[in-house]
Amino acid sequence: MAEAKDKAVVEYSTDSGSMVKLSPAIIRRYLVQGGGAVSDQEVMMFLMLCKQQRLDPFLREAYLIKYGQGDSPATLVTGKEVFTKRAERHEAFRGMHAGVVVCQANGELEHRAGSLVLEGEDLVGGWAKVWKANRDVPYENSVTFGEYVGRKKDGTVNSQWKNKPATMIRKVALVQTLREAFPETFSGMYDADEMSHVESDALDASPVTIDDEPRDVTPEGEPASKPAQPKAAEDAEVTDSLISAAVQTGAALAKGVDAEIMDAARGKAEIAKTVARMADVSDETDEGGLF
């Protein structure tokens, strides 16, 4: 049962029109970064996010990141270019402007376009504006540098924020403003630079190529899969397990994930649709491998 559930494939169309096939086994084998052990709930949440937002994780439009073996939850973040590309394609998008906030010697704050900060100047934040059709004023947002600066476990600033602080804080301000302006487009999507414990430069941005042949993904030290069950019983057990995992996802990953995405994961209609799709393809995956 566990092996059948792990190999069950969900297929959907991405924002660009290409088709993506995902399963828990594929996610665990190819798409987890950080070296940590992800839970079933975290894998399911990542699958649901990719499907609902039509993201292609093989082109690094989404990342599932887990550090260490502790109880800290996994982090789900979106690729660097997804926000700007989707905003540019939106029919209501009318432009954006972003920059940094510098504190002058006299205490005045300068909202400067771009990310130019001279040596000795005090960088204190970032700002952004996004224009949208049928709205008289732009969406506008400012963020504080100290709130988002990325740090290592020992509390020191990580290399990316140390070397490119102005670029980083400007990007955080822009992403937040785009999400506010287009909530239906960017719901549940966060950039890695918004997560202070994630060093986005360390993420592998190269496209993912998967093997044609399935591999045994049973964790080391655990018994092999159960003997084959009658098909009807196996499908019912898989369905019950997937529903249970999806319902638990919202509580397990409450931090850092929009309530809107958690509601979607809990929704009976969405769960039923996903489970039905997995059940439809389970015969194919059992007989022919991952695809």
Image: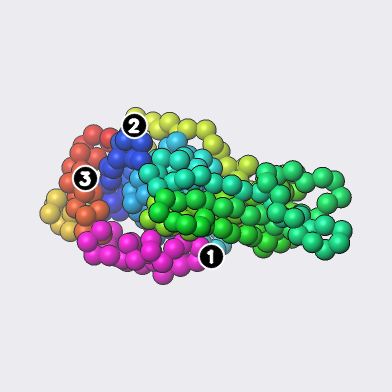
Instruction: Say which residue appears at 38% left-offset and 61% top-offset.
Output: 261
Tell me which label, 2 or 3, sits earlier in the chain: 2
Residue 105: % across, % down: 87, 58
Q: Nearer the viewer, residue 12 or 67?
A: 12
Tell me which label, 1 or 3, sits earlier in the chain: 1
Residue 43: % across, % down: 40, 54
Please name which of the two marks, 2 or 3, marks the residue nearer to the observer: 3
Q: Nearer the viewer, residue 25 or 260?
A: 260
Q: Nearer the viewer, residue 78 or 158?
A: 78
Which residue is labeled 3 in the image?
282
Q: Is 40 left, or right, of 82 in this rendering?
A: left
The overriding secondary structure of the stretch rendered in magenta is helix
Q: Amino acid at mark 3?
A: Ser
Q: Amino acid at mark 2?
A: Glu
Q: Is 204 left, or right, of 93 in this rendering?
A: right
Question: Is 231 one of the magenta-colored residues?
Answer: no
**Residues at marks 2 and 3, CA–CA distance in whole angstroms:** 16 Å
Q: Which residues are magenta?
A: 241-270
Instruction: Say which residue appears at 25% left-offset and 58% top-offset.
Output: 270
Label 3 SS: helix
Numbered mark located on residue 278 in the image: none
Which residue is labeled 1 in the image?
71
Which residue is labeled 2 in the image?
213
